[in-house]
Image (tube, grey):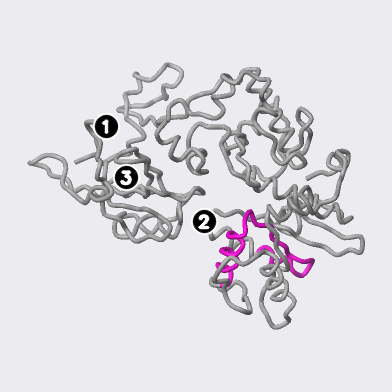
Amino acid sequence: MPPPATTDESTQWPNWREDTHPLDYEDHDIRIIFGEQLSGTADVPRPEPATFGDFDPNPDGPDPDVWPLDHYDPGAPAAVENLVRITNTFPAPHVAWVTPEYIDWKYGHDPRSIEVAPEDLPSGQQPTHATGTVEVTAGDPSMELTDDRVEALQRLIALWNGEFVRGHHLLADKLPSWDTLFGDLQQAELERLRTDPTVDQTLVEAFGDHAWFAEEQSVFLRTQHILRKTVEYAPTLKTRTLISEREEFSALRGDPKEGLTHRVTVGLCAVHYALQGWDTWSYQPVDDYVVDLVAESPTGERHFLEVLTGHHNWELHRSTYRKLADLDQEGTPIVAFDARDTAYDICNHWHRAGLGELPLGPFDSTPRIAWGREKIQEAYAEAGTDWVIGDWFTTDWLWRQTFGSEGPAVDDDFYLSLTW
């Protein structure tokens, strides 16, 4: 039977963990909620696929090593970019990423769209020369750009671009708080930037800080945890698209697809090298690539820096390694990771994928950064080793070296003089 439409006390499933079947996927809680069954009518029965979901999903998006599920999704295997996300709150909040073939098998149509007669559409939306029915897909709820919302977005752009906002700097003040940046504006007006009025609040409470959840709803700012702080104004792709399309907004620096963690790390890399007297250029074209940061010492030594965060798009990580391998002849490739775990996971992946060779094999733990950097530096320096990454840092390490206890005292003019 299908899940109930509501989740009041009469439709609760108190023993759902005992009654659902867990699947063996490491770091996930994927369960078969309902097995394959017959639906339709007695005269025309229709087989229906199993209903499943992940009750402990990865915050960064669908894991390509998991989704779509083998044996349960008729479209598997498939690229995660082509999958459809399904969320539900029964028996508890969960998510699944499935293929269009699964959608067609389960529903017989795309439940996100309906067919209507052309004459039933508003006059301005009626297609010309249409006969029969037309398919209508649900769109995002609109948002009016009120004065306070425009002001908030303009402040966010300035902060992102390295300017001071209400006397505070994104890096120097370690990601200022929401109230510091926007506390003088009408909070009721700004709440629409952070919430989608059409989304079930139970899902918001469960997955509101997950990147995939924020990107696929009509939310413009989401919560992230960066440098051990809770940041409530990380712009979603929807925000970056809105800013790029409106004349009243200045352009955001950087890759339009990068998130706030990536942007902060690029900035910290620029400050780290500038403090050592190096020249820096962010998002710099080099040969056929755009490099997150190019740094050049007074003696002409060049470093090519790429920032990598802990998403599970392994093909993108492999592409970054190949990019740095191509640039190795022109300078030293360096990687800045968002976390120590990310660094070891990605280095191990590069080794196991045959892109490079770690002399001691994959890291079997997450040792301290100083030791891990030393091993990567040794691998790069060893003539007989096929390894192109010369060194690596983390966002936290960069913070300590620049603005933290191990960094020098620098005045505001220094930060304003940097373009990153």
In the rendered structure, the answer to whether residue 110 lies left or right of residue 314 reads: left
Q: Alpha-carbon neighbours of circle 1 within 10 Å: few (<14), some, or many (≥20)?
A: few
Mark 3 element type: helix
Mark 1 secondary-structure assignment: loop
Amino acid found under the numbered disc labelled 3: Ile
Nearer the camera: disc 3 or disc 2: 2
Relative to 266, residue 168 above or below: above
Question: Horizontal and vertical percent for residue 335?
Answer: 69, 60
Where does the image place residue 268, in percent across and percent down from the top left? 75, 49
Residue shown at 38% from the left, 55% from the top: 68
- Is 329 part of what is drawn in magenta? yes
CB of mark 3 within 8 Å of CB of mark 2? no
Which circle's residue, 1 or 2, is located before the other in the chain? 1
Q: Is residue 394 above or below residue 48?
A: below
Q: Looking at the image, tell me whether mark 3 or mark 2 is earlier in sequence order.
A: 3
Q: CA gap, disc 1 to disc 3?
A: 19 Å
According to the image, label 1 marks what residue? 5
- What is the span of residues highlighted in magenta in the rendered image? 323-351
The structure residue drawn at horizontal position 18% and vertical position 48%, both measured from the top left corner, is 37
Q: Which residue is mark 2?
A: 312
> How many residues crowd mark 2 within 10 Å: few (<14), some (14–19), many (20+)?
some
Q: CA distance from mark 3 to mark 2?
A: 24 Å
Horizontal and vertical percent for residue 233? 62, 34
Q: Count the numbered circles shown.
A: 3
Which residue, as the protein is rendered here, is positioned at the far right? 298
Determine which of the numbered discs, if any, sits on residue 372 in the image.
none
The kind of residue tagged 1 is Ala
Q: Secondary structure at mark 2?
A: loop
Locate the C terminus and report the quarter of the image it occupies. Answer: top right
Q: Which residue is mark 3?
A: 103
